[in-house]
Image (cartoon, rainbow, N blue to C red):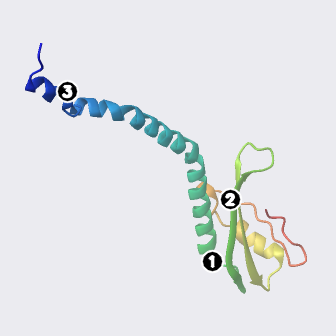
Amino acid sequence: MPSTAQDDLHSTRPPSTARRKRRWKLPAAIAASFVLFFALIMTPQWIHNRQLDGLANRFLSYPLPPETRFSDDEVQASVALRGNSNHCDYRLRFNLGTKLSPDEVARHYKAAQIGIEGGGISVVVWTPSEPPPFP
């Protein structure tokens, strides 16, 4: 049978919209899977970073002890599994200049309920002769 103009039209016509949509389903599903996997893996880190930022903000906005000032603007912060590794430890380190004893400074911050979820905190004070072991 001889070909007609209509047959030629069908053979050169671009793929239908449904066919084009099917062509993108697999790459879209693969990309969505990677995005969801990334979000699943990163969620704990995002939560810990948010809690660490909140702790740092509460610590820095808490009134300083009398006759005390910040020595510099640097605050070091970390989240890690320490000790028996059954929980995350949030660690902040900042430098203060004060005329108070280390025990007085520690008591001032231990009395504050500024820990994660309003809990207490563990305070360690180092003097210039004792460099702190910080990563």
Judge from the rendering whether residue 64 lies leftward or rightward of residue 43; answer left or right: right
Q: Which residue is mark 3?
A: 11
From this viewpoint, which residue is outermost toward the left? Answer: 5
Residue topped by disc 1 = 63
Mark nearer the viewer, 3 or 2? 3
Coordinates of residue 27 in the picture (x, y in percent): 41, 36
Tell me where residue 89 appears, x and y as whole percent. 71, 53
Q: Residue at x 68, y 76 (%)?
A: 74
Front residue of 25 and 7: 7
Residue type indicated by callout 2 = Gly
Label 3 Cα neighbours within 10 Å, binned few <14 / some 14-19 / many ≥20: few
Q: Does the image show residue 118?
A: no
Q: CA distance from mark 2 to mark 1?
A: 16 Å
Report the amino acid beneath label 3.
Ser
Which of the two labelled residues, at mark 2 and mark 1, occupies the earlier sequence position?
A: 1
Front residue of 118/71: it is: 71
Marks 1 and 3: which is nearer the front?
A: 3
